[in-house]
C-alpha cells in the first residue's frame, strides 16, 4: 500500500529525516534513520512532512499499515491527525504505534485519541556504566560469564571497519544456517536487515564492534546514538559455541564504543518470554513505555 503524497524511504533521504530527528531527539528505539533504512524491506516505510513534523507510515507485508509517532519541532497534534487521516484515506484502520508516553498522553488529553500501553514494544534502558563494568553482587553471575569467556578463549575485540564487513557477513550467514533462518520469517527479515546495514556501512550513522577468535568474527554488535545521552543497540549476534560470548560482546561494545553515553537502549522484547527474561536479567535502569494511539474522528 502506498499513501498518496508519501515517498518511499531511500538512502538519499537520510539528511532530510535526520533534520527532524535532531530537532526532536527521540527516546523510542525505532526513530533513527539507520533503523528505518535497514528494515525497509520488511516495514516498507514511507514519509512526508506536515505541520513542521516528519510523518512516517509503515506498511509491512501482510499486515495492517500504521503510523509512527510524528517527530519534529512542529505541531504534533496536527501532524498526528494528518497521518491518521492519510492512513484512513488509503483504506487502513488508522493507528499510531510505538508512541512514547509523553506524546500518547498529550494526544489523549487533547481529545479525539485513545492511548493503550503496548508492553511488548516498550524499550529496556540501562546505565552504560553498569553494562560496561557489571559492578557488584547484582551482576555477579554476568561478570562470571564474561570472566570465563576471557579466561578460556584467546580473542580480540575490534571496532568495525570496512575490511571487517565481509567477515561479519560470513558470521551472520553461519549464524543463520545454525538457526535455520530460511524457515522463520522473522529471522529471515532480520537477516536482510543486517545485510542492508552492513552493505551500507559508512553511509549510515551506526558503529559496530566485533570479537575475533583465530581471525574469524564470532560475535558482533551494531548501534548508534539515539539522542544526546543514549545509544541504541540494534543488532547483537554471537556464536553459541563459545560460552560467554554474548556477555563479552555486550560488555565490550558498551565499554569501547559508548562510554560517553549515560544510557543504553536495548530495544524491546516483542512479548517473547526468553527475550524478556534475558533483557530483565541485565537489570534495566528504566523502561521507555510505548503506546498504540487510535483516533476517534475517522
Image: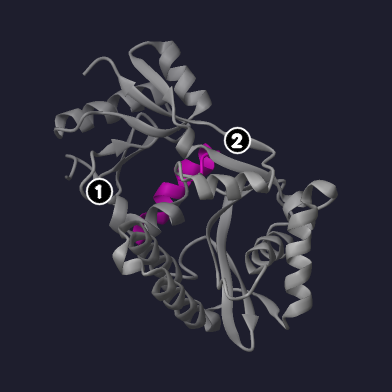
**Residue corresponding to mark 2:** 287
Q: CA distance from mark 2 to mark 1?
A: 32 Å
How crowded pointer 1 is (Cα within 10 Å; few <14, some 14-19, many 20+) is rated as: some
Q: How far from the left and from the top, in percent, is residue 194?
A: 43, 66
Q: Is residue 40 visible?
A: yes
- The residue nearer to you, when weighing 153 against 90, is 153
Residue position for label 1:
7
- In percent of width and height, residue 291 lies at 44, 28
Q: Nearer the viewer, residue 116 or 23?
A: 116
Residue 159 in percent (x, y) is at: 64, 73
Q: Residue at x 65, y 35 (%)?
A: 286
Nearer to us in this view, 80 or 138: 138
Give the answer, above or below, for where 241 lies relative to 115: below
Position of 96 compared to 143: left or right?
A: left
Quadrant containing the N terminus in the rendered view: top left
Disc 1, SS: strand
* Magenta range: 11-30
What kind of secondary structure does the magenta stretch mostly adopt?
A: helix
The coloring applied to the image is: one colour
Please give the name of the residue rendered at 23% of the width and 26% of the height, measured from the top-left corner. Answer: 85
Residue most toward the right?
A: 136
User: Residue 282: where, in percent of width, then height?
Assistant: 68, 48
Q: Within the magenta stretch, is there residue 242?
A: no
Dot 2: element: strand
Amino acid at each position: 500500500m502506498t499513501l498518496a503524497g508519501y515517498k518511499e524511504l531511500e538512502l538519499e533521504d537520510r539528511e532530510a529525516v535526520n533534520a527532524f530527528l535532531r530537532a526532536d531527539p527521540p527516546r523510542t528505539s525505532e526513530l533513527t534513520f539507520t533503523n528505518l533504512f535497514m528494515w525497509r524491506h520488511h516495514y516498507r516505510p514511507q514519509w512526508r512532512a506536515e505541520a513542521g513534523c516528519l510523518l512516517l507510515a509503515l506498511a509491512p507485508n501482510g499486515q495492517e499499515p500504521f503510523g509512527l509517532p510524528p517527530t519534529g519541532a512542529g505541531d504534533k497534534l496536527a501532524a498526528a491527525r494528518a497521518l491518521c487521516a492519510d492512513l484512513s484515506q488509503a483504506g487502513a484502520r488508522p493507528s499510531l504505534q510505538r508512541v512514547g508516553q509523553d506524546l500518547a498522553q498529550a494526544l489523549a488529553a487533547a481529545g479525539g485519541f485513545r492511548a493503550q500501553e503496548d508492553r511488548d514494544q516498550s524499550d529496556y534502558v540501562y546505565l552504560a556504566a553498569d553494562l560496561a563494568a557489571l559492578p557488584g553482587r547484582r551482576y555477579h553471575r554476568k561478570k562470571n560469564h564474561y570472566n570465563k569467556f576471557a579466561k578460556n578463549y584467546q580473542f580480540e575485540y575490534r571496532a568495525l571497519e570496512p575490511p571487517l564487513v565481509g567477515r561479519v557477513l560470513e558470521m551472520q550467514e553461519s549464524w543463520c544456517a545454525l538457526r535455520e533462518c530460511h524457515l522463520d520469517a522473522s529471522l529471515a527479515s532480520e537477516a536482510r536487515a543486517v545485510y542492508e546495514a552492513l552493505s551500507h556501512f559508512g553511509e549510515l550513522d551506526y558503529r559496530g564492534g566485533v570479537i575475533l577468535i583465530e581471525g574469524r568474527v564470532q560475535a558482533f554488535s551494531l548501534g548508534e546514538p539515539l539522542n544526546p545521552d543514549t545509544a541504541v543497540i540494534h543488532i547483537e549476534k554471537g556464536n553459541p559455541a563459545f560460552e560467554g560470548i554474548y556477555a563479552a560482546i555486550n560488555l565490550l561494545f558498551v565499554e569501547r564504543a559508548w562510554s560517553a553515553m549515560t544510557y543504553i537502549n536495548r530495544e524491546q522484547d516483542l512479548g517473547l518470554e526468553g527475550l524478556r527474561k534475558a533483557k530483565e536479567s541485565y537489570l534495566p535502569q528504566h523502561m521507555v513505555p510505548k503506546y498504540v494511539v487510535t483516533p476517534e474522528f475517522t
